[in-house]
Amino acid sequence: MATATARRPVLYLASVIPEIAQTIRNINPNIEVKEVKIDGDPAELSGIKTPPDVLASALKDAEVLLTDPFILGPILYRLPRMKWVMSTWAGPDKVFQYVDQSKPFPDFTLTRFAGKFGPAMAEYVVGNIVARERHFQEMRQDQERCKWNWSARANYRLLSTLSLGILGLGEIGKEVARACQTFGMTVYGAVRGIPEDSNKSPYVSHYKLLSELPEVFHNCDYVCNILPSTPETRGLLNGDVFKHCANKKSVFINVGRGDVVDEDTIVNAISQGWLSGAILDVYPEEPLPASSKLWTCPGVTLSPHVAAVSFGWQVAEVVCENYERYVQGLPLKYQVSWEKGY
């Protein structure tokens, strides 16, 4: 008896990220990809010029879509035949900005780009900690002044003597924990709920609830936020919570989402001596305005949201794997909960 062949719907692609379509075809020639032209500068990300009406019309018959969250948001309720959408970003918050609480949630499954960001984030965190502890920036300045400054630059701390608190122990947080613990750092993990022993990461020495942040801050030389943007996490670190970092004069690292804390809180914590500095890759407003106090705040290192980026070839790998699960009727990986927002 002949075996029924699984139906293989067209994969629509609407993204400013280059190389995705060709990589999908290289990985799996049996996936038919239909590209929707996006007018805009890829370097500007959200600065697309294609009107939502044009996008909605181009996608009116689509069942499966791979797209950027800022493209999906404005047409969220205008995809009548959609069954599955994969976002090219790890965080879905740009989509949820368009969720209308007075309406039912969209009836298609939303998944996100995941399974790839952990190593890149870990490299960023470890690299910045090493650079700060070993005075890389200061030694570069010494070099420019032709200054041999042995006594100051030989005064550094080994990572094995330091502790790191990670806010959020999902896939990325666990990889950051693994990388830092490999260098001998003591790792604290702050989570919504303490997992069963069988689900705990072997690289985390101390699990604490988010409600126990003061204890985490008191004990950690570095505090790294990797929490997603949700109603519960927005503004979580605003106010004077960083006063609990005064014991170690911690350095705050943010590679999660910028809206977990406002810039005035960070600047004040540094001026008060609670924090000795900050390493920031995400901000409440992006691009970071030239008027921001963070640009000139002592002890602050800034980067333009590049700790981990969605490379086209990696996005293609994830969508190809999930596409085969979709056509086989298997549960999709990296599903986003409409109710929770992540």
Image: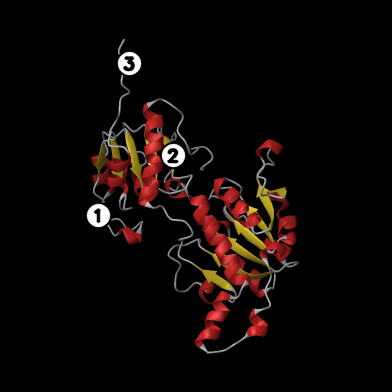
Q: As drawn, is 13 to the left or to the right of 185?
A: left
Q: Which residue is labeled 2 in the image? A: 111
Above or below for 273 versus 232: below
* SS of the residue under disc 3: loop
Q: CA distance from mark 1 to mark 3?
A: 43 Å
Above or below for 315 versus 44: above
Q: Which numbered mark, 1 or 2, is in the foreground of this view?
A: 2
Q: CA distance from mark 3 to mark 2?
A: 29 Å
Which amino acid type is shown beneath numbered disc 1?
Answer: Asp
Residue found 66% across the figure and 49% down from its top: 203
Work out which quarter of the rendered image holds the N terminus and state it: top left
Q: Nearer the viewer, residue 146 or 99?
A: 146
Numbered disc total: 3
Pinpoint residue 231: horizontal percent, then vertical percent: 56, 48
Which amino acid type is shown beneath numbered disc 3?
Answer: Thr
Pinpoint residue 146: horizontal percent, then vertical percent: 53, 89
Q: As drawn, is 156 to the left or to the right of 48?
A: right
Q: As drawn, is 307 to the left or to the right of 66?
A: right
Circle 3 residues within 10 Å: few <14, some 14–19, many ≥20: few
Task: Spot the residue most to the top.
Answer: 1
Contact, CB < 8 Å: mark 1 with mark 2?
no
The colouring scheme, among rainbow, by chain, secondary structure or one colour, is secondary structure
Label 1 vs 2, first from the N-terminus: 1
Res. 208 mark:
none
Q: Which residue is labeled 1 in the image? A: 39
Residue found 55% across the figure and 77% down from its top: 137
Is residue 286 visible to us here?
A: yes
Q: CA distance from mark 1 to mark 2?
A: 24 Å
Which amino acid type is shown beneath numbered disc 2?
Answer: Thr
Q: Which residue is labeled 3 in the image? A: 3
